Amino acid sequence: MNIKNISKDFGIIEEINYLSTASIGLVPISVIEKAKDFFVELTKGGTITLDEEKEVLVYEGLRKEGAKLLNCRSKDIGVFNSVTEVLNVIAWSLDLQKGKLVSTTIEFPSVTYPWIRLSRKEGLNIELVNSQNGLIPLDDLYESIDERTKVVAISHVEFLTGQKFDLKKLAKITHDVGAILVIDGIQAAGYEPLDVTKWDVDIYIAGSYKWLCAPFGTAIAYISEDLYTNLEPCFVGWRSTEDIWDFDATKIPYAKTARKFEYSTSAYGAKYGFMQSIEYLHKLGIKNIHDYNNKLINILLQELIQIPEIEIISPSSRGSIVTFKFKGIKVEEIRDKLREIKRPIELTIRQGMMRISPHFYNTEVDILQFIQNLKQILKEI
Ligand SMILES: Cc1ncc(COP(=O)(O)O)c(C=O)c1O
């Protein structure tokens, strides 16, 4: 598979200049078809089309692809329904009494909310590191992790600015004080080469519907062996057990792997589609996607830097996301005008800033078309 000329694999990319993957990624047509067929198949035939073996295999297939994506063993991967679900499951399964959680004030809310909620019940202290002009000063982050800290929860790549953290360094600092590191990787997985084993993080969560180009309704999480061996899950159900077909209601013989944190049936079609999408990305090569996206981002930055009305917020260490402000101009006005042109441009506005997030289905032409139209609009208003 060639990363160039990939647009035919995606439905709308020829009519729309889609630069909004940090919100929702496009799903390859082949994956949509396979997931749709799978859904129809299992819906129409009950136990005939979804027998016990197949019900297990849906998760196991995703687990295997997920392990390849994150560089860990299949048994370290749990299959879930969303990133938010995993963050809550982990937060409520840990024993954090009177300890401290470290995160930041600019995190995606799902990263901080579970711990804030928990703090109301358990006396957990919350320390959110302040941003400076949209970015987290690394020294402030590292210094906030001290002997009282029990958990550090943070995104690998920030949703707002694309700021990317050095996970190996963060894991070392976190472990030195005896705390655990929980990483939300939804804004990185799909273009950043991932290596949870090398980084030594405790939890790494990859959601389906952004950079991994998969349907909604699923996420996978690396859970360290230490955690799944020693923690008791906050939610339990028939799928939490070693043999899910045992149906012994009198005790809970937990699975001895990350599967321990799974508990119920779910939207199996979404899981199947997720597996297909990861397979699709693996054929392209995550490192290839990373380098390709990086090239697009560099072209974008070179152009943006020359526009005097723009202040770039994203730092040099960033993912495939560039965020910027307009000096004295309403960003919504520009967004609306970009949607009215011949090949409309789809991008995101977050907290008064414009966010551009290209993926491998975009091209240099897309970036230059955006810049050209942006300059024209700025001249006219
Ligand atoms: C950093 C981050 N975490 C979590 C989410 C939401 O994940 P989910 O919908 O799977 O709970 C988003 C969505 O934008 C996000 O940007």
Image: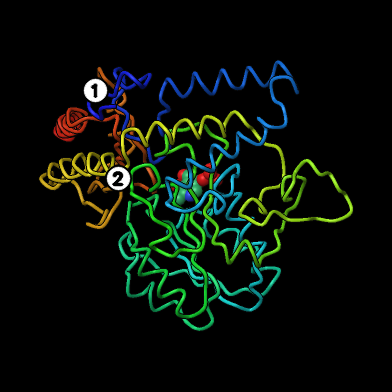
Under circle 1, the secondary element is loop
Q: Name the image quarter holding residue 198.
A: bottom left
Where does the C terminus fall, quadrant-wise? top left
Q: Name the image quarter holding residue 265.
A: top right
| Label ID, residue 256 | none
Q: How is the image coloured?
A: rainbow
Instruction: Name the foreground residue: 93 vs 281.
Output: 281
Where does the N terminus fall, quadrant-wise? top left
Identify the residue shown where x is 51% and y is 42%. 64
Left or right: 233 in relation to 225: right
Instruction: Name the foreground residue: 152 vs 76.
Output: 76
For the residue marked with disc 1, what is the amino acid? Asn
Number of marks in the image? 2
Instruction: Rate crowding at label 2 as few (under 14), some (14 to 19) or many (20 or more) other CA atoms within 10 Å.
Output: many
Q: Residue furthest left?
A: 306
Identify the residue shown where x is 53% and y is 46%. 220
Identify the residue shown where x is 69% and y is 72%. 122
Q: Position of residue 136 (x, y in %)?
A: 35, 65
Tell me how far mark 1 sits from mark 2, CA to CA.
20 Å
Under circle 2, the secondary element is loop
Residue ID for mark 1: 5
Identify the residue shown where x is 58% and y is 55%. 87
Residue ID for mark 2: 320
